[in-house]
Every structure is written in structure tokens, then in C-alpha cells.
Amino acid sequence: MLAIAYPPQTECDEESENWEFALLLQEQDSKIQQRALLNLALSQLSEKERFVIKRLYWDGWTETEIAQALNMSQQAINKIKKRTLQKLRDMLS
């Protein structure tokens, strides 16, 4: 069995680890806040807008597949997508 010798941890190393841990927590909080803001913005969309965005970006559907599901043209779905993405950008900026 191979024994690995680690250098003794110094006070400076502990401070560095604490600082890195604090940064990780801050990053996690930021992600949680971003998700909450996105969920809030999505809740303000119409049902059709939300359906299009979720199918495109969560479920990986194509515009054509969404058009068939909603009995619309692919061009209409593209317009909804563009308008909705701009709406989300405006809400989140």
C-alpha cells in the first residue's frame, strides 16, 4: 500500500481554504438567485410563450415539432421565440 504524506497544514492554508469555501458558497447563492429570477420571469410569460421556451431549451424540441404540437407554422414559433427571448432579456437586465 502506498502511503501519501501530506504537508502539515498551516494557519495560512486554513485561511485559504476558508476563503475558497466562502467563495463557493457565494457562487452557489448567486446561482440560486439567478434561478429564482429566471423562474419569476418565466412565470410572467403567457402559457404559449412558456411552452415554446421550455420545449426549446429544456426539452430540446425543434421549432417544427413545437409548431406541430400547437398547430402553428414554424415561422410563427420562431417569432414567438424571438419576442419571448427579448422579453426575458428585458425582464432580467
Image: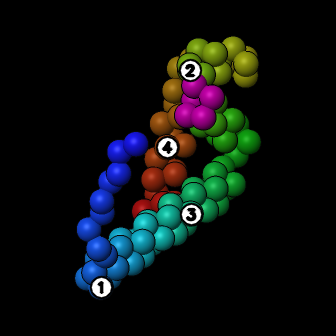
Which residue does the numbered mark 1 point to in the structure image? 11
Which residue does the numbered mark 4 point to in the structure image? 85
Secondary structure of residue under mark 1: helix
Residue 54, located in which quarter of the rendered image? Answer: top right
Q: Are circles 3 and 2 on residues that touch, CB within 8 Å? A: no
Q: Nearer the viewer, mark 1 or mark 2?
A: 1
Q: Which of the two labelled residues, at mark 1 and mark 3, occupies the earlier sequence position? A: 1
Q: Is residue 19 visible?
A: no
Labelled disc at residue 32: 3
**Could you say which is closer to the camera, residue 69 or residue 6?**
6
Residue 55 vs 10, above or below: the answer is above
Residue 89: x, y in percent? 45, 53
Labelled disc at residue 63: 2
Residue at (50, 64) in percent of width and height? 28
Distance between mark 4 and mark 3 Cα atoms: 21 Å
Secondary structure of residue under mark 2: helix
- As drawn, is 50 to the left or to the right of 8? right
Q: For the image shown, how many numbered marks are present on the structure? A: 4
Residue 26: x, y in percent? 45, 72
Amino acid bearing label 2: Glu
- Badge 3 crowding class, 10 Å Cα cut-off, few under 14, some 14 to 19, many 20 or more, is few
Distance between mark 4 and mark 2 Cα atoms: 14 Å
